[in-house]
Every structure is written in C-alpha cells, then in structure tokens.
Amino acid sequence: MCGIVGILGQHEVSPAILSALKRLEYRGYDSAGIATVNAGVLDRRRAVGKLVNLSDTLVHEPLPGRVGIGHTRWATHGGPSVANAHPHRAGRVAVVHNGIIENFRALRDELTADGAEFHSQTDTETIVQLTSQLLDQGRTPLQAARETLARLDGAFALAFVFEGADDLIICARRGSPLCLGHGAGEMFLGSDAIALAELTDRVTYLEEGDLAVLTRDGAQIFDAGGNPTNRPVTRINLDTVQVDKSGHKHFMAKEMAEQPAILKAALGFYSGLDNDRLELPEGLDFARADRLVMVACGTAYYACQVAKYWFEKYAGLSVELDIASEYRYRDPVLGADNMALFVSQSGETADTLAALRHVRPHIGQVVSVVNVPTSSIARESDVALPIHAGPEIGVASTKAFTAQLTVLAVLALEAGRARGHLSAEEYTRLVEDLRSLPGFVAQALDREGEVERLTKMLSQARDVLFLGRGTMYPLALEGALKLKEISYIHAEAYAAGELKHGPIALIDKEFPVIVFAPHDGLYEKTVSNMQEVMARQGQVLLVSDP
C-alpha cells in the first residue's frame, strides 16, 4: 500500500517528489515524508495524515536539495505517527521502504546490544540503523547497502540517500516492485511507474534481487548475484488525463463509468480478422492441458472463482482454484501437462508473484491476466494477457474486475474451441453474447438513480448478507467485499444453499439480504432461499435480469 519516489534532479526536488507522491495517493496511506541532501547535508520532513500536511510543513520548513527520496506509509509495524513515518534516518543515511522485514526483531536486539538507539516501532528503522553501523565501521555507501540487504529476510523495495553524497541514490528490490526513470541529466525511481509519468516516459523495471546505484549520469544495476547487468529501457505512455477524476465526484465513480468503453476495447484487442472469432496470443496450448490451476488474491480471486465455472462448462477442463497467500505455502501436486493461471490487476501482488515462482519449475505453462503488461507477473509468465483497463486509482477495484472477467471469458471460450468441447454454433453464439456485454453494462450504469434510492436502506444497516448460487456466489462475495471496503458496513456472503447452515439464525426485520438471482437453471432454488429470508421478515434486495 506504500509509495516510494526518488529524484536526482537539476533543480530543487522536494516539490517534484511531493507531486509524484500525490500520484500514488490512491494506494492509501497514513503519513508521508521526504529526505534530501543539500550541499552534503542530509535532512528530512515528515507529517501524519494527508500529503497536504506534509506540504504545509514544507512551506514553513523548506527542504532544499537536488537529490531526495519520498514515501507514503501505510502502518504495518507501529501506528501512524511522525516517529514511525518514513524516511527513517540514523547517522549519515536515510531510507524509505515498502514491504515487511521478517527478521527485524532479531536484528533490532542485536543492534540495541551494540548501542543503537531506536526512535520508532517500525521494522524499517532496523534497516537504517544497520546501514549506519556499517558506514561507521568504514564501509562505502554501496558496501553498506549490500551488506545490509544480505542481512534482511522478507520482502522489500527501498532507497537510500547519504550525507555528503549529492549525486547518489542506492535502491534495491526483493518481492516488491521498483522502477527507474531516465531523464536528461536526471534519474528517477518509483514503486509504480505512474508516479513518474510527469517526469519521464523512459522506464527501467528492476528485476527480482536487483540493486541499482543512481547518479545523474545514469544507473549501474547489479543482479541478485551482485554481477553488473543491463535491464531494458521501456517507453511508457501513461496518459496523465487518465488519473484525473474527469468531473466525477471520485475516482471510483469515474472508473465505474469507464467500464463500457474498457470492455469494448478489451474485446476488440482479442478479436481476430474474422469477426466471428476471438484471438489469443501465440503460445497457449489448451489442447494439451489436463488441469488448470488458478491462483489470485482478493477481487482477482473472485473473478477466478466465476471463471472456474466457465472453464469447466465450456472447455471441459478440470480446475483447481487457490488463494495465493495460502497456495504459496503449500506443496501442491503439479504436472508437466498442467497449466497455471495467475490473475492480478497490478501484476505485482506479492503473494501471487510468490505463488507463481513457487510453481514455475513444476508446471507446463504459466499464463497471467494482468492490467500492467510490464509487471513482474507478466514478465515471468509464458503468456501474459492484458486487460487494458488503464490505471485504476480507486482502492476498491471496479473496472479491473469486470475487465478481468471479460478476458477470462475470452480464455474460457477459446479453451473450449481448442479442446473441441464447444460446437462451432455454440462458440459463435457465445462470442456474440460476449460482444454485447459493453452495451448491457452501459444500461446497468444508466440505472444509477434507482440504485441510489436503494442505498438509503443499506446505509442504516449494521450487517448485510449477500446470497447467490453458481457464478452468482463469487459475485456475492465480491459484493460483500465492496460494501465493507467502501462503507465500512459489516457484510458477508454465502452460497444461497448454505443459508440454512447458520446465517438464517441471524435474519430479522433489521437485516438486509441482497440476493443475486438471474433467470437461469438455479433461479427457482435461489427464490426458495429468498422466501426463507422473507419468512423471517428480512429485508430482501433482489438483483436479477428483467
């Protein structure tokens, strides 16, 4: 959830760092800070709350310097406070860090025994205290950074600046994303390329285990083994308009409104010259696959849960579905004829990426569905399928979720065709149905006024239950997640057939129940469950087709 920015510039960098951090606000944060080196002097400013608080601090206490690092923090170790905010400093070094250092307690005890004085509750301060100790022992900044990284267990993306070094930033990544930006006599770094969009269009994505030494002349990159290496420079085209609200009240409303156009664009991308056919990138071999393993987190996991029904029904393919944060710690039984499918909006979801690396040596094909085609998950897949949703700034996923479902539907239909499980007539009919999806989404969005009236009832609720069967069950799960994320109202979702196994005991006239019941083969059964709710005076909100 945190954001990192670094700049080696030709002018004062604090304003540019602050502006870049604002482009990462969508990730959520509780504090922020900047450290610079000016004429050899290392200094920093930090503030709790929104970036405007840091901006106000900089007005009253300017922070000059042409080299600096900045950070937005989401509390993990230690609550929101100035003391816990990044950058952390010890002696002649300051650091910003994304991730979690798993062995920080042991390191902290060791450093405390050596006389280090800690001023925060964070795992990050352990990094800077260790680096400071190594500098005091005579290491160069690069030596100190390398030896520090070698002692750390866990995931991180981090950046150091050093007192007395006006032309140096050292950064590294392991398990968390980090990219470099190239300018004319300037260098930049960010935890997300979107932070650099106003600074440069030339980006280098660091690989797992990379360390980079930045000066204004460029970057020297070392791989996980400490060997000098080259990483490609990629031209990016992040339209700055895409991260504006475009007249909407907030980003989530804007991104919901974008869905018809995004789904149309995604379907257009996967359309062949023959309008009756879909087309996928080369390298996919569904005919050979005897099992599909789908792995994701959060909303992406619910998209996979929907798609599981499609792959089984339309492709006759056995599907195993797992949550990435659980799967990465299992010992799954895999084979050369299995296909693994990883779904992630960012393409950098730590647990999903770790799960991919966990199965990579043991499986036939690795496929991903991502929104960022240059992401780690995309780069480490045999085939990466972009969803073309554009930057999703709202914390609660909307357009990325529906775009994931659309691309997964394309995959399922193409798998069915490749495996001979779908007749030509059925395939053509389903493709036509899929192409009509953007229009149906537009019609649903046109009913915003009706939906708004219904939300008045929900806004008074303390608890809400979502019910569904078949593909509607994972959609119920996603609905409950959205209600929790956006309104902070407690919500749960159940498969409708499980209503009698516990949840029914909670139903009363104060308990809203949202039921997903399209007119399919399960409609009558779902209606029966709905009637059970009504018999207990529960408030029913039915979501169905005309």
Image (spheres, helix red, strand yellow):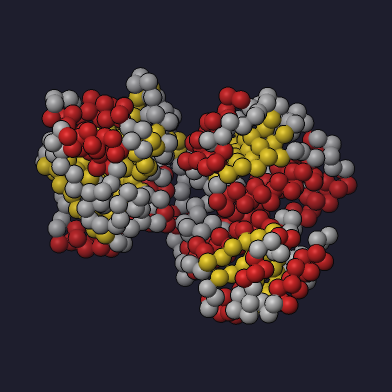
Q: Quadrant of the C terminus?
A: bottom right
Residue 206 x/y as whole percent: 40, 33
Q: Please name the residue shown 55% across and 47% down the image.
A: 297
Can residue 100 be seen here?
yes
In front of the other: 132 or 425 = 132
Asked if residue 406 lies left or right of residue 3, the reply is right
Asked if residue 457 lies left or right of residue 89, the reply is right
In front of the other: 118 or 229 = 118
Residue 513 x/y as whole percent: 65, 71
Residue 544 x/y as whole percent: 74, 68
> Please, is residue 82 above or below residue 296 in the view?
below
Residue 56 x/y as whole percent: 21, 63
> Please, is residue 166 above or below residue 390 in the view?
above
Place residue 451 in its image quadrant. bottom right
Q: Please name the residue shown 59% across and 63% down the image.
A: 492
Asked if residue 433 lies left or right of residue 347, the reply is right
In front of the other: 489 or 60 = 489
Place residue 342 in its image quadrant. top right
Q: Please name the residue shown 51% across and 59% down the image.
A: 396
> Please, is residue 283 above or below residue 235 in the view?
above
